[in-house]
Image (cartoon, grey):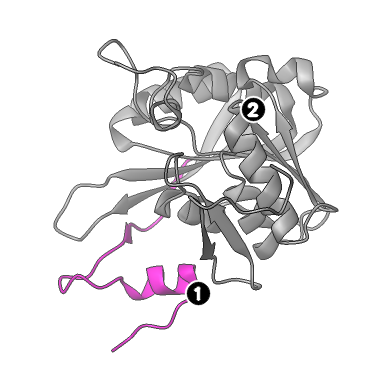
Amino acid sequence: MQEGQIASHERIDDLGCKGYRMIQNPNLFCFGMDAVLLSHFAEVKEGEKVLDLGTGTGILPILLEAKTQGRQFIGLEIQKESVDLARRNVELNGLSNKIRIDEGDIVKAEEIYDRSQFQVIVSNPPYIDSQGGLKNKEDAKTIARHEVLCTLEDVIKAASTLLQVSGRLYMVHRPHRLGEIITLLRQYQLEPKKMRLVYPSITKEPNMVLIEAIRHGKPMLKVLPPLIVYEENGKYTQEIYEIYGMENEV
């Protein structure tokens, strides 16, 4: 399918910023709140070059282009169907001059890009350590959720290789793997500098963690205030409305 075309089984979602839209295929892995929160958490300065490791349908490069003054945004994705969809999303929003989608393997990222060429790397990697129990390891949704084609260590190693000194990695993951995340970050000379836990509600345990790490940074971790998603009445909190660019309906 050519860039910009829409298939009958696909839908178009409004991103709520700059008039951008996303083609979504329910048969693949559709983006969720974690990608939106990561795009809000990540800091991209004017003129910086950004790489998204495991871009899926291209949501992070498109959101970051909308929200920041970065110079160039590149998404790396291994699944051919997702690459096709991501490229069509870029074309749909007229962003081909700012965003490029590359087909390739995170494990071999250092063979695809020059070392130390990015100021910022973002990633919303598979959360689940897939030690057995997977029936269909080739299913697109399984690959997006489980460490079938790449592990947490693969993502962090690639980021360390491709970031400039003092470059920044922004990642969203699950809190129960936080010890492993910090250990691997430091193993690959990425010092965790900021962390924010995301809670479904004030009475529940956190289900996401947002992390900033700096290549060859000095040790000092700042824990930001918790981000609460829902009020007791089931509506989004004011901060979530602001992140999504929506008005709070009273």
Ranked by sequence position, the earlier of labels 2 and 1 is: 2
Give the mark count.
Answer: 2
Res 212 quadrant in image? top right
Residue 159 is labelled as 2
Is residue 143 depicted above or below 72 in this figure? above
Q: Quadrant of the C terminus?
A: bottom left
Q: Quadrant of residue 126?
A: top left
Residue 37 visible (yes or no) = yes
- Which quarter of the figure has residue 139? top left
Label 1 SS: loop
Residue 219 in view of the camera: no
Q: Nearest the camera: 138 or 51?
A: 138
Percent position (x, y) of residue 194?
A: 49, 45
Q: Which mark is residue 245?
A: 1
- Mark 1 nearby-residue class (10 Å; few <14, some 14–19, many ≥20): few
Q: Position of residue 74 (x, y in %)?
A: 73, 40
| Quadrant the N terminus occupies | top right
Q: What residue is at 57 percent from the left and 54 percent from the top?
A: 23
Magenta part, dominant SS: loop
In space, the residues marked 2 and 1 are separated at their CA atoms by 30 Å
Which residue is at 64% across, 27% downward? 159
Please tell me whether residue 40 is drawn above or below residue 206 in the rendered image.
Answer: below
Residue in the image at 42% along x and 51% along y: 32
Three-letter code for the amino acid on which mark 1 is drawn: Gly
249, above or below 70, in the image: below
Query: Residue 240: x, y in percent?
Result: 39, 68
The magenta region covers 221-250
Q: Position of residue 9 (x, y in %)?
A: 48, 50
